[in-house]
Amino acid sequence: MENLNSYLIVSAVLFSIGTIGVLTRKNAIVIFMCIELMLNAVNLTFVAFSRHLGNLDGQIFVFFIMTVAAAEAAVGLALFIAFYNNKESIDVDDANMMKW
Amino acid sequence: MDMILIPAVNMAPILPEILLSVLAMILLLINVFSPGGQKSSLAYISFLGIIAAGVLVAIGWGVHIESFSGSVVLDNFATFFKMTFLVAAGLAVLISDSYMEREGCNQGELYPLILFTVVGMMLMASGTDLMTIFLGLEVMSVSLYVLAGFNRANKKSNEAGLKYFLLGAFSTGFLLYGMALIYGATGTTRLYKIAAIVGQMTVPSSNIMLVAGMLLMMTGFAFKIAAAPFHMWTPDVYEGAPTPMTAFMSAGPKAAGFAALLRLFLVALPTLQVEWSQVLWVLAVLTMTVGNITALRQDNIKRILAYSSIAHAGYALVGFAAGNGTGTAGILFYMLSYAFMNIGAFAIIILVSKKGETNGNVSDFAGLGFKHPLLALAMTLFLFSLAGVPPAAGFIGKFYLFSGAIQKGYIWLAVIGVLNSAASVYYYLRIMVYMYFKESTEEFEWVKVTAPVALALVIAAAGTLIPGIVPSVILEYAQMAVKLM
């Protein structure tokens, strides 16, 4: 598999885009989408390694990550709704009641 | 056509986890069919379940079983940490009911969520595969996000849940990327196999993928144990979350983070110890200093304890940086005694605060020593223990953590730790000064100590005092736990 490096580069770029998105975006849902992008970059890394190494551990790991990401999305969106109900906004700048 | 062999599965190592998960699901069902408002019975059932799980865990002391093809192990290390988690959860359950009643968010889902959190933490402590550790971590975290935002009507609680969720999920990304790189560098996710493969490398520290993976995993866990510079979420989440959950969060998940990190580094990456102990050295100094200095200028008592909990993670990291028997046994001892003293202190904060979490400033403790001498005395004991004054357990814990560092030759690390510990006395003493030397403006007529809270306070006080006077009752077990890992 001489292509391993290209996969790793793509996933590293995806991971970085996700990280930058988390740090710069203000809307909680967009931030969460960026986190999902990071997780999927990890999934791509796992699958590329799994194919390269010829063992299935990495692909099984990916199944677990996808399952957990779904559970996290359920909980996260519920928290967003609770926040929205009280604040009428989903902007993280409005999460400013507690500082220092 | 290859035969697919299904390996024999020994369920014994995860019996406590099974018990708690089944109990949590039964409680969810009971909650649906029980009339609203009265949720005390759920608290009692889950407390009994925690005791039963404690018995199951205690039976496993001294046993060493690997199961699920080596992805879960039952050993003394796991057993010790499981006990710590059960102590934290048991105390949290005891102090929850009256608080939730007062705040009007007495939904019965609270107790199943606490139990699921414990299951996740137990899997983290006994996992010997990156997948098991990751799954345990997520079972724990997802339940904790809900617990932090549990008081849906309270804006601060909403905010705490939101912040904890976003930053927790963000840190999971780093952790997973680290795990992926370790998998790529070694070709396996089993900790023992990783250790064997890394051991065969000629110069493991020159393997960039391995070192980057290690650092990314450390970043992910540093978020979970609230180590600086990844601690920014801690004060906000601890302040906003319902107080019993803050108490639980500061004791249980922090211990679980240390359990997983210790097993990961000491079992899978001992050949990189020179590298990781240098990083931990820096993390420990930063964490202690940032936690203590920021705590000095806080007025809200939950925030003070939040920053103090950051500082305590720093003390534990001192023992971790040392990485020797004394230091790691010190971490185990410290995490258990920290569960007792911190949850005890939070129990008193709950009693003194009023509905809507008002009355939570240091000045609101003025005169408590005259109106409620016993409560003030217990608070004094917990604060002395947090500050590390003998004869409380906190002193013995710090003593072992710092002497581990000295044995390893990290004299400066121990010196910085002791200086930090001395600085921390200021903000703990400040609370005591208010309790005993300030005129009381209030009658504290709202302070009602219910039977479960009283029981929690007695257990916490005993757990803080007895190991301080007779350290061997816990320390011997802690030393046995780290020996056979």
Image (cartoon, rainbow, N blue to C red):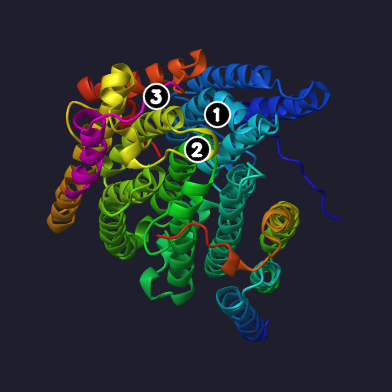
Mark 1 residue crowding within 10 angstroms, few (<14) / some (14–19) / many (20+): many
Residue closer to the observer: B377 or B457: B377
Give amino acid for label 2. Thr
Mark 2 residue crowding within 10 angstroms, few (<14) / some (14–19) / many (20+): many
* Residue B195 appears in view: no
* Residue A56 appears in view: yes
Mark-to-mark CA distance, 1 and 2: 8 Å
Give amino acid for label 1. Tyr
Mark 3 residue crowding within 10 angstroms, few (<14) / some (14–19) / many (20+): some
Q: What's the residue at 42%, 59% (across, down)?
A: B231
Residue B385 left/right relative to B162:
left
Q: What's the residue at 56%, 24% (across, down)?
A: B98
Q: Which residue is mark 1?
A: B99
Residue B322 at x, y percent in the picture = 25, 51
Q: Which residue is mark 3?
A: B444
**Which residues are drawn in magenta?**
B423-445
Residue A59 at x, y percent in the picture = 72, 63
Front tag of 1 and 3: 3
Q: Is residue B202 magenta?
A: no
Determine whether B104 is above or below A5 in the image: above
Are discs 1 and 3 located on one and the same chain? yes
Residue B184 at x, y percent in the picture = 57, 69
Residue B380 found in image quarter: top left
Q: Which residue is mark 2?
A: B243
